[in-house]
Image (tube, rainbow, N blue to C red):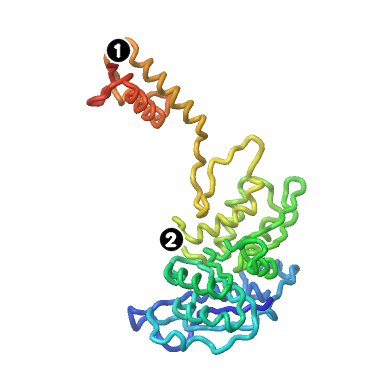
Amino acid sequence: MRLVVLRSKKAGGISSGKSDYLEIHDTRYARRVIGNLKGEDKFCTVCYPECIHCRRPYQRRFGKQIVAVMSFPAVLPYLLEKPSGYVPQRLPPHEVIIAINIHDQILLEILKECKAWGTKAVVVPLEGPGWVSPATMKEANRICEGNKIEISFPKPFCSFKPLQESLLSRFRAEFHIGFPEVDLTVEGGKITRAFVNVSSPCGATYYVARWLVGRKMDAQLRFHVVSKRLHSYPCTASMEWDDEIGDTVLHLAGRIHNQIVEPFEKFPGEEESLIMTPMGIMLPKPVPVEENLRNIENATCAILKKLEGRKWVSLHELREMEDASPAAINSALIILKREGQIEMAHGKVTRP
């Protein structure tokens, strides 16, 4: 499978300090992805002087399959008068394009030409809010759907896990990049081997896996290894708040890498207290319906017992009861009032 990479690159010309009507495109992330795909030894120096060349045994060097790397100015006006002027007349034969933080208008112009170039699929990673506007994504999907070209906007790129049997799924498997997959071998309570089947496109998964080897199988792996190493790599995803995911993209990348060690954080009898939403947000696990109903029934009995032999009971006193939660008490009060068993006024609960 042949690949074309589109990226922004710092160059002479427009200076970002000359106008308020310019946008600046990230250049670091493209360097990471290209370095990882080519298997360059020196693109990652974070372990120095403890480098063990953790990528080398995999022999994943795809430089010959990258048939072109096209660079566009990293600083451009928000509105381009002639975006088509930035688009090449032709590209070498290829199947997949990765477009990393290039100008929205240039991206759309390129997508219009993809059918003529023979492009089969396009990946547009989003490592931060604002890398591609919603309007541009909508138009890009329309163009690609009309030309029968697969397109994906993974946020971040390490969340990339396309549908089986798609060309993009074949691309992920062949280049070993996307949603991380790591096989861990555990012997005597320690991780003795961490084999990376699929790495995050920036290569961080190899670095995380390298430091998992030799660690005890315990609940501290997530904090002491995954989080620590991902931040020191460092992950290049944005720390800017993203309304779409309700968090920062960097935190989402961290949760994606946490799944590598999650099987080793669950011990017999231990219940998971949090769940991950489809957007990757961790929320408290909901209380089962049966338990909620039981709690409300217990609160109802406790309220009626408090009223026995008394003219009234204050709401404050009821909400301070230790044998029922405030939420269960409130629900019980609503039910009792609706059934006509109590009346409420001026902070007091009475029997009718």
Q: Residue at the top extreme?
A: 309
Q: The residue tagged with tag 1: helix, strand or loop?
A: loop
Q: Where is residue 149 in the image (x, y as percent from the top left)?
A: 58, 73
How far apart are the two marked residues, 2 and 1, measured between alpha carbons?
A: 54 Å
Residue position for label 1: 310
Quadrant position of residue 209: bottom right
Q: Which mark is residue 242?
A: 2
Q: Position of residue 259 (x, y in %)?
A: 61, 53
Q: Residue at the right extreme?
A: 187
Density class for disc 1 (Cα within 10 Å; few <14, some 14-19, many ≥20) is: few
Does residue 302 sit above or below 164 in this rendering? above
Q: The residue tagged with tag 2: helix, strand or loop?
A: strand
Q: What residue type is labelled 2?
A: Asp
Q: Position of residue 173 (x, y in %)?
A: 69, 66
**Which quadrant is home to the N terminus?**
bottom right
Q: What residue type is labelled 1?
A: Arg
Relative to 56, 326 lies left or right: left
Quadrant position of residue 94: bottom right
Mark positioned earlier in the residue sequence (2 or 1): 2
Q: Residue at the left extreme?
A: 346
Q: What residue lies at 50% left-to-right and 54% top-to-bottom?
A: 279
Q: Residue 226 carries which label?
A: none
> Is residue 287 at all visible to an observer of this figure?
yes
The residue nearer to you, when weighing 311 against 139, is: 139
**Circles 2 and 1: CB atoms closer than 8 Å:** no
> Is residue 320 at all visible to an observer of this figure?
no
Q: Where is residue 250 in the image (x, y as percent from the top left)?
A: 51, 61
Q: What residue lies at 29% left-to-right and 19% top-to-bottom?
A: 313
**Which quadrant is home to the C terminus?**
top left
Does residue 45 sit above or below 272 in this rendering? below
The residue nearer to you, when weighing 99 against 49, is: 99
